[in-house]
Amino acid sequence: MNGADTAFIITATALVLFMTLPGLALFYGGLVRGRNVLSVFMHCFAIACLMSILWLAFGYSIAFGSANPWFGGFDKAFLSGVTLDSLTGTLPEVLFFAFQMTFAIITPALIVGAYVERVGFGFVLLFSALWMLLVYAPVVHWIWGGGALADGGIFGETGTRDFAGGIVVHETAGLAALLIAALLGPRRHRTTPPHQPGMVMVGAAMLWVGWFGFNGGSALAANGQAAMALTVTHLSAAAASLSWILWERIKFGRASLVGLVTGTIAGLASITPASGYVGPVAALIIGGIAGILCQEAVNLIRNRARIDDTLDVFAVHGVGGIFGTIMIAVFGHGSWAAQLGALAIVGAFTLIVTFVLIKLVALVTPLRVDIETETNGLDLSVHGERAYELNS
């Protein structure tokens, strides 16, 4: 065990949890109508609790067990065989478990943005639980757990390069979000603007800070790679923020606060897979392109495809993660076959299993709330509480 590495990853673990609670909750909560903000908080918080327990029970073992290249098995279920002396690299294995647990929390929480304001709470919990175990955990095993898409797998010695989750986190969550949004149908108050842009900015700022643990911590050591990952993460976020509002100004004649911070998230998502491999100049290029690319993806999904991915999860996270994964090959840090092949395999797997899970869970608990509940807002109708004494 290395003390410096251990202290660093303890800090990174706290930062990644901070991304979900309260960062993502505030970011998403500010974007919805005031009568639905508590439901968003409820979704994020409940998912964090449920994923933590399921990661202990089966998720960690499925992801980092050694049964076969496609499925980790259940040897490590409930941390079986893991002691205080067990190591993963230079880290206590229980800390590695905790760090990876925070990723298992935020990935299904990202999907929340696609279905807020109209989804059943029971569906959120049951779908998120099954999705994490049957989609997220297996994909982690394939790429980070030494499985089929890693070095020595189906793509040969040079396997898939995904430093912190462009495929594992952002592609899977983005595609699942898009599919749920398409099957769920649009909101009845689709054109309602964000109720609290200031809350959106605060949440985005927390996500930005937490992302240093997300990407920097993925080096799993306090070393130069972690320092570079942190640096390029910041630069990409800054570049994407500015390119987003510049493109807004060119197209619409004004730059918005919500646009600025959405660009931040686009830059962060796009640099995530490449953050351990590229340098500062490449980060500026990735971020600068991402701010425009993801904004155009929002327009494509929202206005042309007419899919109500409420908070643009696929356009920002999905497109950003896929773009960043491809840029690894563009800058010569991974093979084209492995990067594109992994995107295709994981994409197809995610869509197929997610579709089946949506249909199965909908047989058990309603996918969508009724018209009256949606109109009145989920806060009071579903949870018996309201955030504000306002007619918003």
Image (cartoon, helix red, strand yellow):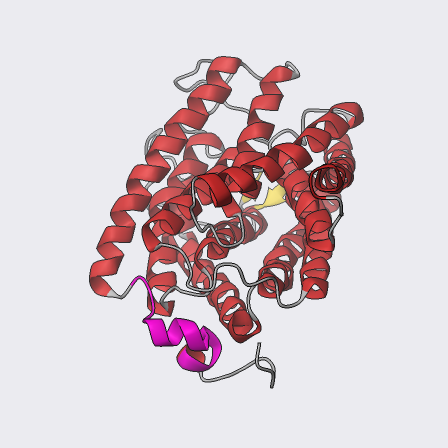
User: At 33% from the left edge and 31% from the top edge, which residue is drawn?
Assistant: 68
**Of 259 and 53, the residue lying toward us:** 259
- Residue extending furthest left? 363
User: At 68% from the left edge and 29% from the top edge, which residue is drawn?
Assistant: 289
Read off the magenta span: 367-381
- Magenta region, main secondary structure: helix
Left or right placement of residue 2 versus residue 385 in this view:
right
x, y (%) of residue 201? 72, 58
In the rendered view, tell whether residue 295 sits above or below residue 382. above
Left or right placement of residue 341 versus residue 98 in this view:
left
Please tell me in which quadrant of the rendered image residue 203 appears.
bottom right
Q: Is residue 327 magenta?
A: no
User: At 28% from the left edge and 50% from the top edge, which residue is drawn?
Assistant: 357
Left or right placement of residue 178 versus residue 267 in this view:
left
x, y (%) of residue 55? 43, 54
x, y (%) of residue 301? 48, 41
x, y (%) of residue 79? 43, 53
The quadrant of the image that shows the N terminus is top right
Q: Is residue 290 visible?
A: yes
Q: Is residue 2 visible?
A: no
The quadrant of the image that shows the C terminus is bottom right
**Of 197 and 24, the residue lying toward us:** 197
In the rendered view, tell whether residue 242 sits above or below residue 207. above
User: At 38% from the left edge and 75% from the top edge, which residue is drawn?
Assistant: 373
